[in-house]
Image: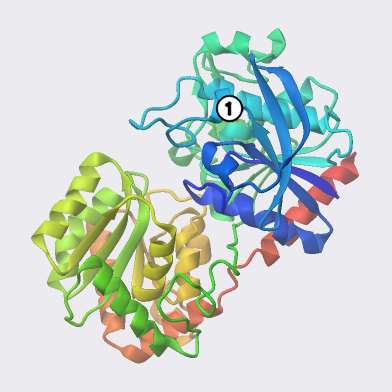
Amino acid sequence: MEVLSVASEVFPLIKTGGLADVAGALPAAMKPHGVRMRTLMPGYPVVMQKLKKPQKIGGFDNLFGYPASILAVDHDGLDLLVLDAPELFDRDGGPYVDKTGLDYVDNFRRFAALSLTAAEIAGGLLPSWKPDLVHVHDWQAALTPVYMRFGPAHATPTVLTIHNIAFQGQFGPDVFPELALPREAFSMSYVEYFGDVGFLKGGLQTANAITTVSPSYAQEILTPEFGMGFEGLLTARLSSLSGIVNGIDTDVWNPQTDKNITETYGPNSLKKREANRKALSAHFGFDNAPGPIFCVVSRLTWQKGMDVLAEVIDDIVDNGGKLAVLGSGDPVLENAFISAATRHPGRVGMVIGYNEPLSHLMQAGADAILIPSRFEPCGLTQLYGLRYGCVPIVAHTGGLADTIIDANEAALAAKVATGFQFSPVSAASLRQALRRAFAAYRQPKIWARLQAQGMKSDVSWDMSAHRYADLYSSLLAKG
């Protein structure tokens, strides 16, 4: 089976969040199921700099007003198709925002170009390759099935995966004439969304199958609380909706071989984590006092519950804990964590930004990872935590609820617990979860069992890849 995957970011070339990890890991996970997956992505500067000997295999004289090339290249085992359109993607900022943090005003054009290119490839643009199925990710690629509906690839099945329904790609109606779509596409059946143009909305209307990244999130987005305005549309398409939990790349995230950490270890050699704890403490300037180290690797936003976490930092310190934070986002929240680090030198440390090697060391050296998200489609950091013996403390929502077994009395007695869940997302509820975690930490045998059980959890892509393969096959069988 030949599958075209379309994503706006792919690890290890470029990453702003979990989408990149999924797009980077899924092709290898699908190979054992007889799926050859080629991934189409934009040619951002950081991507173009990393490519070695790309070959031009197609292109456009005029893609929304600009010339563009399609480059084929193998990178770290990924079979990539890169859309090289410098006028659209050669920017000094990030993939979506400029250096000041503002969205590029032509994002509609940039990602319409990505989607149209995917649709043209599905329709036979490349002389030597044509996919049997197209799998697109999030709003940036969601116009692909819309373009396909009105083009030669209208019979090719499509899958749209929602990684976070809060990001919808909504633009004013004035952009529609620039999208190279027929007039009828600006209707409720396609991209029209409360008078605007909705990229994700168009994909939800036209994709043959819709997946999201955990079973619980698939149920949550059918409700007004989590559906972000799409709950009615998704309910109408319920028979096409499913939740398939993400896995992680267990070669990249492997504490027994990880070159980013000070000392490697496994579930039977947890004492070796101490070297990583010391390295982490040195990096964040922690003192040598005993007590658990909690870590956060996250965007600092309301969605991620970082305001709630900021409320309980003093409690963590008062109970003998320490907190290491890696992230960026809302300036108010950034300042709240910086202020806490100033109040508690040697106990609270803050690094603004994102640092992939440091994130590995944090999972290997901290005792627990805090994820108090108000909603979390899947989440990957809790899976990394399980893999590294960094016990997750998570809100009971979405993929967090699906992947962490709460350390209640029954689960502890059965020796199946892997972390701590709490609900609702409030300071009081988080404090209670922290009290439970502190109590468990003071009993080394119980804590070690939580770590070891988590490390035995299957966080790979094996089961999820099997479900994707079944979904692909079912769509092709419908012909």
Residue 289 at x, y = what percent? 16, 81
Viewer-nearest residue: 44 or 467: 44
How was the colour assigned to the protein in this rendering? rainbow
Viewer-nearest residue: 234 or 342: 342
Which residue sits at x=51%, y=57%?
A: 399
Residue 87 at x, y = what percent? 56, 23
In this rendering, position of residue 285 left or right of residue 385? left
Which residue sits at x=78%, y=27%?
A: 120
Residue 466 visible? The answer is yes
What residue is pinned by disc 1? 86
Which residue sits at x=50%, y=90%?
A: 268
Answer with the quarter of the image where residue 159 lies. Answer: top right
Residue 206 visible? The answer is no
Seen in the picture, residue 42 relative to 462 is either above or below; the reply is above
Viewer-nearest residue: 149 or 265: 265
Seen in the picture, residue 39 relative to 436 is either above or below; the reply is above
Which residue sits at x=50%, y=59%?
A: 380
Answer with the quarter of the image where residue 206 lies. Answer: top right
Residue 43 at x, y = what percent? 60, 36
Q: Which element type, helix, strand or loop, lies under badge 1?
A: helix
- Residue farthest front in this picture: 53
Residue 149 at x, y = what percent? 77, 24
In this rendering, position of residue 408 left or right of residue 84? left
The amino acid pointed to by label 1 is: Pro
Answer with the quarter of the image where residue 320 lies. Answer: bottom left
In this rendering, position of residue 272 left or right of residue 70? left
